[in-house]
């Protein structure tokens, strides 16, 4: 479906019916374990690195915690470290979700992780680092700065 274009592109309902017919309900949830793991790592890294980096920026530059510059630097750093920790999970998730329904290349996320490292080397887990960071950097920066500004507007202290 992802590569279909023009008049022959299937509808979302047609695709859902086909998926249900050939894979059952489980087809809709293929790769969910790796998606959940990825989400946990992503959000944990984002908040922990943002908070830690913010402390360093305040300590070494003398800028205030509420400074937009402090928030910006900390958010950009958090986006970078998110990319470092999430890239392997993105690779595993993509492989699991794209494996053919009729051929079981990987039995689960752990099996996929091990096979990637064994067959292609550990650096394969970070393939696509720059495009992922290009996506994370602006969104993470905006999310965290807006989050901090909304906290301020609501009378809450900066993180």
Image (spheres, helix red, strand yellow):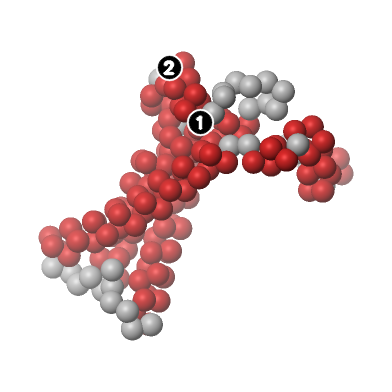
Outermost residue on the top side: it is 119
| Distance Cα–Cα, label 2 vs label 1 | 14 Å
Q: Could you say which quadrant of the image residue 4 lies in?
A: top right
Q: Is residue 149 above or below residue 134?
A: below
Residue 153's label in the rendered image is: none
Report the residue at 27% width, 60% height from top. 51
The image shows residue 72 at horizontal and vertical percentages of 32, 63
Q: Where's the N terminus, which quadrant?
A: top right
Question: Could you tell me which secondary element the residue under label 1 belongs to?
Answer: helix
Foreground residue, 112 or 49?
Answer: 112
Residue at 86% x, 40% y is: 8
Residue marked by disc 2:
118
Q: Residue at x 64, y 41 (%)?
A: 29
State whether residue 65 is above or below residue 110. Answer: below
Position of 154 with respect to 93 (left or right) is left
Residue 22 lies in what quarter of the image?
top right
Asked if one can make out residue 134 in the rendered structure from this viewpoint, the answer is: no
In percent of width and height, residue 3 lies at: 72, 37
Q: Is residue 23 visible?
A: yes
Residue lying farthest front?
Answer: 25
Q: Position of residue 82 (x, y in %)?
A: 37, 47
Quadrant containing the C terminus is bottom left
| Residue to which mark 1 is pinned | 109
Neighbor class of circle 2 (other Cα within 10 Å; few <14, some 14-19, many 20+) is few
Q: Secondary structure at mark 2?
A: helix
């Amino acid at each position: 479906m992802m590569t279909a274009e023009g008049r022959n592109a299937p509808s979302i309902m047609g695709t859902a019916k086909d998926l249900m017919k050939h894979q059952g309900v489980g087809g809709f949830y293929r790769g969910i374990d790796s998606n959940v793991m990825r989400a946990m790592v992503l959000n944990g890294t984002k908040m922990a690195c943002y908070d830690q980096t913010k402390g360093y920026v305040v300590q070494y530059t003398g800028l205030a915690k509420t400074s937009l510059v402090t928030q910006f630097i900390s958010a950009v750093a958090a986006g970078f470290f998110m990319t470092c920790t999430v890239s392997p999970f993105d690779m595993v998730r993509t492989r699991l979700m794209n494996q053919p329904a009729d051929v079981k290349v990987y039995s689960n996320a752990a099996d996929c992780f091990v096979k990637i490292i064994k067959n292609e080397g550990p650096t394969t887990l970070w393939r696509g680092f720059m495009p992922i960071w290009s996506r994370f950097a602006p969104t993470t920066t905006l999310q965290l700065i807006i989050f901090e500004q909304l906290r301020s507007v609501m009378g809450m202290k900066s993180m």
